[in-house]
Each structure stands twice: as structure tokens, then as C-alpha cells.
Amino acid sequence: MQSRNNLVLVIIVLLVALATYIALPIDHPDWFNRIVAPHQKDDPNALTLRLGLDLQGGTQIQLMPDLPEGQTATEEELDRARAIIERRVNGLGVNESLVQTGKDRIIVALPGVEDPDAAIETLRGTGQLEFVDLGDTPLPAGSQINTTLGPAPNPVNDKVYETIMTGDKLKNVDVRRDPNTQKPYIAFELTKEGSEIFGKYSGDNIGKYLAIVMDKTILSAPVIRAKITDAGIIEGDFTVEEAQNLAIQMKYGALPVPLKVVDVRTIGPSLGEDSIRRSLLAGTIGVIVVLLFMLAYYRLPGFIADLALLSFVSFNIALYKIIPVVLTLPGIAGFLLTTGTAVDANILIFERMREELRAGRSLTSAVEAGFSRAWTSILDSNLSTILTGLILLYFGSNFGASVVQGFAVTLIIGVLVSMFTAVFATRTFMRFMIQYFAEPLKSKLSWFSV
Amino acid sequence: MYDIIKHRRWYYIFSTLVIIPGLLIMLYSMLTIGTPFRLAIDFTGGSLWELRFSQPIPPGEMVSFFQSQGINDVNVHTIGNPNTLVIRTKPLDPAEKQQLLTAIEQQFGEKPVELQFRAVGPTVGKEVTRTAFIAVLMASLVILGFIIWAFRQVDHPVRYGVSAIIAMIHDVLVASAFFSLMGFIAGWEVDALFLTALLTVIGFSVQDTIVVFDRIRENSRRRKGESFEVIANRSLLETMQRSIATQINAMFVMIALLLFGGVTIRQFIATMFVGMLSGTYSSIFIATPLLVSWNNREGIFGWFGGRKKARPKKASV
């Protein structure tokens, strides 16, 4: 029993040392990262504390399918749209950008982006390519038109034109030059489905006008000269560079569904820095006051609770780095609140111990009774907090994404860690102490604030 | 042994005196602005733009500037610093925002620092309101279920669950009333963080109540001869030290966050602070007295049938 406790103590001390080493804000050697966080092996930022946009500054954008009432995008369409958005984001050259799909939306995080407005324009502005039936009247390139897929911001007329096909039916797009005039043109190939739709339409409408429309703006409006099945060309008055840009947009910018920006959140870097500085200060002061209170109020057990609380802090930070957890301002608040929970577990135990000592029990049995009696209260109350945390996590994706989830994640981790440090580790420390110092402590019950 | 339970009517009256005015504030708010709280753009949709200038700009000037730009629905206020303006309008798209920024630069002679910008579409707002409502309801049901399960081995576990939920609703009402009041005093607006604060208050309120109930469960087993009222009172006194010590610790952390923490989470922390204060109070002075009242079939608990008002000698839990 005693030697087992000593072994457990050694293991706990080693774990705390390991956690503290991970928690330190230093560069850890590569081999160490590979062992501790194998899932982050290709990440240059392995084992660093990741800060949310509200702490480091940046922009978060939520995009949702922009479809007429009653229509919804399929999961697959949303996923393809995400892949396209991701390519565009990578094109922006923002470090550590992140593109995720939520339940019905795409969430883009651009930390430290210099010009958020331009970034938003790039993300949502380009890319929906449509082939539109103009009928007998041609319209000049640059005109905006309403189509059956949605209205244009500044249409040239009130008419709603019929969309024959969208850009996702394109298989291949290339820029070529006319061998005689050297004028560039765009050659495209269609998928099997596209060939069927386009073949039927072009066959029935020879001599009529077809508009190639990017984001409701006409790029060119050629006459249909022949039935087009699997391949076609777009001629227009553009330079080689313009043609190449257009081809890239057609290739990568063909969103399966139109997207609209539903939520933009930009935090300037100065506000982020201010938040970090303030949170650190508030956290340090809060923890120091709690440490002093526990020491003054519970004395010797309080000192042990303080050791447990310090290891609680190390374990939490280490876990944030290993998992990894993106730390946000509400996340820090969640962590600090669980320091309260951790201390609460110790308070429950020590109050119980005090009662038993006052009832005349021996030190050893009072300590054991304190832990075993307080355990059900600690477990029940912590389970209720974890349940609340899980509900927050589940619903969090719907309100403002990371804000609520960041809080829920640190809350849940904190409560779980507190059960380890405040109950298991504290008990091991106490047993160790009593095992070696039971005799001298007997006359020093005041150290237990009895 | 001091008898806390005996004075339970006074606690009910005290809580009623706190909650009724709180409900009235929310009712007044319903009548004047249509909702019990001022809603942030998370719910209504719109833009929130925080700009810092090098010198104080009167909010009124900014309002007339926006109106001159054709944006009439605009609300401008300062937080903490007179140099920093928080501007709330309809959702602005990036192009509009850039135009406004250029115009602001011309009008006020300097390019302000953009501290924060947020735009939420109106459809999202509606959806958030619905989900928020479901979340609070879900949390209550799950916790009710959890308590009934945790206390399944005692008599009447439902009583424990319902009493804890009443205490929890008590705390939610106190925190909400506080927020509604601050809406009038300081223009506080309900956002996603307020909901987080509320759900945390729910979690911790129940946590406090469970600690006391747990002691009642244990004492009922050990002291079969005592009446339920005596057992409940004993359990309250035995857990009192813990309740106070824990509350003091939580307060230290929250006061530190309030004084030194970021401005952006100040409302969140303050709401949680009030809610947790109410949570400690309600676990001692509402949840446990309610259990006793129910056991003795006092007041409305008499309607639930069963034994007469005369208290049973034997502990019935």
C-alpha cells in the first residue's frame, strides 16, 4: 500500500515535470515533438500555444449557400465549395489560415490578415460561372444580368435569364491562340453530363446568343454557330493575361453553389495584443490570490492544494498544446473558472477532513475519510458541469462558432484535469506526507486548521 | 445548532422581492423595445464597427456623418475611452465599408484604427435566436434527468431534480434581470457570450445544489431517527463552510478578470458573477428549503396529494 503510493507519487511528479516542460514557452526539440504529439508531426508549429483570432487579430468569415427559398445545398456541394474556397485562401498567402465546414456553412479563419476587406472580396466575389440563354438579343460584355440562379447587384434590365448550365460541368479549360490572328481564346471541355445538357441546348438554339457569365457579369456573348457537345471555345476581346485569369477562374472558381457572406468578424491586431496582456495579468493575479487564500485558510493541506493547483495549470497548458486547442478570450475565462472548480474539490475534501478530525478521528483515517466521503459530491457536481459543457459544445457551432466552443472546450478539459490533480494527486501527496510525518504532525493539528 | 430551514418563508419572500422587479424590468423592456433585452447583432443581424481615433469624437457627430452618407439606422456609443467609437448599423459589405472609411478619413481628418468589425446577415440572426432557446431548454432537461438519475436510490428523486431546477431558474432569472437592467443603464446587449454565461450559471448553480443534496442523501442514510427537516438543516450547516470558501475563490478569479481582464468579456464575467452569487444563495436558501416544504406539503406542494400537512416523524427521504 505504502510502496504503491510512493510509486504513484513518483509517476505523478514525473508527469508534472513533463507537463511543465511542454507548457514552457520554448522551442522543444523535434524528436520530443514527434513523441509527445505524433499527430502534429508535419506541423512547423507543433507544441506551440495556438491563439484564436480574438487574441492575435484577424478575420473570421462565415459563408452560406445563397439559394432561392426552399432549396438547400447537399453536403457534397458544400464540401466541394470548401475545397475551392480553400484554394483561394491559400492564394491569399495568409499563414495558418483555416477553412472548415460547419453544419450548413463554410467558416474561414484568416489570422493576422492585413486587408480583410480585400480578402473577403476575393473569397466570395469570384467564381460562379454560368452559361445563360440570351435568346435573340445580344448584350455587351460587362453587363450584369439576373439569372434563374439569383439576382445581380446592378442588372441592365429587369429580365431574369435562364441558366443552362453552371461551371461545375466543365472538365478542362485552356488558353490557346488563333494561329492566324494570334488572338487568345479559351477552349473548354465538358463532362459527360455537361455534354448532354449543352448538346441539346446548342442544337436547338443555333443562331441565338449564349452568354458566358461570371458572377452575373457577362464575359462574352457569342452566337451559337453549331451544336456543341463535348468541347467548345470562347472568343472575346481579351489579352493573353486576361484570358489566363479567366481560365483560372473557370477552372478553380467554379463553385457548385453560389455563396453569400453571412458573418464577418475582424479583430484588429492592437485589440488582440491588449486582450492577451490583460488576460495574462488577470489570470496571474486571480491564481495568486487563490493560492494565498488556500494557504491561509487550510494551512498544510492548503499548501498541498497549491501544489496541485500549479500542476493543474501546467497540465492544462500542456494539453492545449498537445491536442491542440485554439485559445480564445472566452476560452481563457473557461480555464480560469475551472481553477475555481479544481480548488472546490480540495475545499470539499479538506472540510470533510476537518470534520473528521474534530470528531476525534486519527489523522490517517480522517484523511482517507475526507477523500472517500467528498468523492461522490465532487463526481456528481463535476458531471453536471461537464454535461453543460457538452451542450455548449454541441450548440456552439450555431452561435458565433469559436466563441462559445472555445469556452466549452477549456471548461471540459479543466474539469477533467481537476479530478486528476485535485483528487488523485492531492491524495497521493497527503498519503506520502502522513506516511513519513504522522508522528510529528499529531501534535500539530493546527496545521490542518482544526 | 442554528436553524436555517425554519425561516424558509423569509427566503421565499426575499427571492420573490428580487425576481418580481427583475421580471418587471424585462416586461418594461418588452413593451419599449420589443424584447426582454437589448439584442446584439448576433440576433438581429447588422454591423458592429469599433474605430479608434487619436482624439475624442462626439458620438452625435458620427451619427450625423452616417446619416449624411445615406445610412439612417445607425447607433454610435463609446466604451471606456472617448477616442473609441462603437458604430452599429445594417450589415455593411466590404465595398460599402471601404467607401465609408475613405469618407470618414476626409470628414474627420484622420484614418482611424479599426479595432473590430463584425457583420451578421439577418437570416443567421433568426436561426441563432432559435438555437439559443433550444440550448437553454436542453440544458435544463439534461440536468433534470441527471439529478433524477444521480439520486435514484433515495425516495422521491424527482423532488430533488425539480427543486434543483427551480433554484436554477431562480439564478437564470436573477442573471437575466441584471443584464436587462444593465441594458437600460449601460446599453449592454445580449450576444452569444451572454448565453454562454447563462449556461455556465446553470452548470454551477446545479453543482452547488448537488453538493448540499449529496450531504442530505448521506445524512438520511446515517441518521434514520431524525426528521427530514433536521437532516436538511444539518446538511446545510455542514456544507456551509465549503459553499462560502468556494464562492470566495470563484469571486477572486472573477474580480481579477473584471478589473484587469479584456474589455470584450467584461459583460460576460459580470453576468456570470451575479449568476454565481445567486447560485450559492439559491442552493442554500431556495433548493433545500423547497425540499423541506415539499416533504411537509406546505403551500402549493399540498396540491400534489398524499399525506397531510402534519410532518411525518420518520425521515421520508
Image: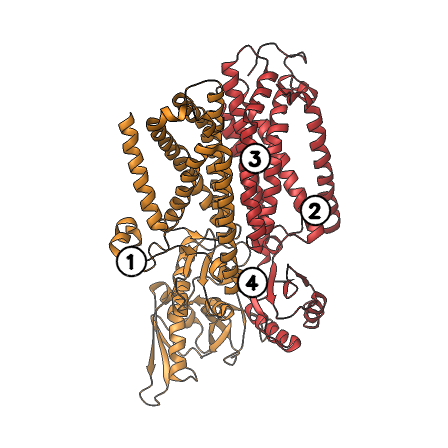
Chain colours: A orange, B red
Residue A242: give x, y in percent of width and height: 41, 81
Residue A52: give x, y in percent of width and height: 46, 56
Quarter of the figure that contains the N terminus of chain B: top right
- Mark 2, residues whose alpha carbon is within 10 Å: few (<14), some, or many (≥20)? many
Is B97 rendered above or below residue B106?
Answer: above
- Mark 3, residues whose alpha carbon is within 10 Å: few (<14), some, or many (≥20)? many
What is the chain letter for disc 2?
B
Classify mark 2: helix, strand or loop: helix
Q: Which residue is mark 3?
A: B205
Residue A327: give x, y in percent of width and height: 45, 52
How far is the residue under mark 3 from the one under mark 4? 34 Å
How far is the residue under mark 2 from the one under mark 4? 26 Å
Observer-nearest of B102 and A440: A440
How far is the residue under mark 3 from the one under mark 2? 22 Å
Residue B183: give x, y in percent of width and height: 68, 50
How far is the residue under mark 2 from the one under mark 1? 51 Å
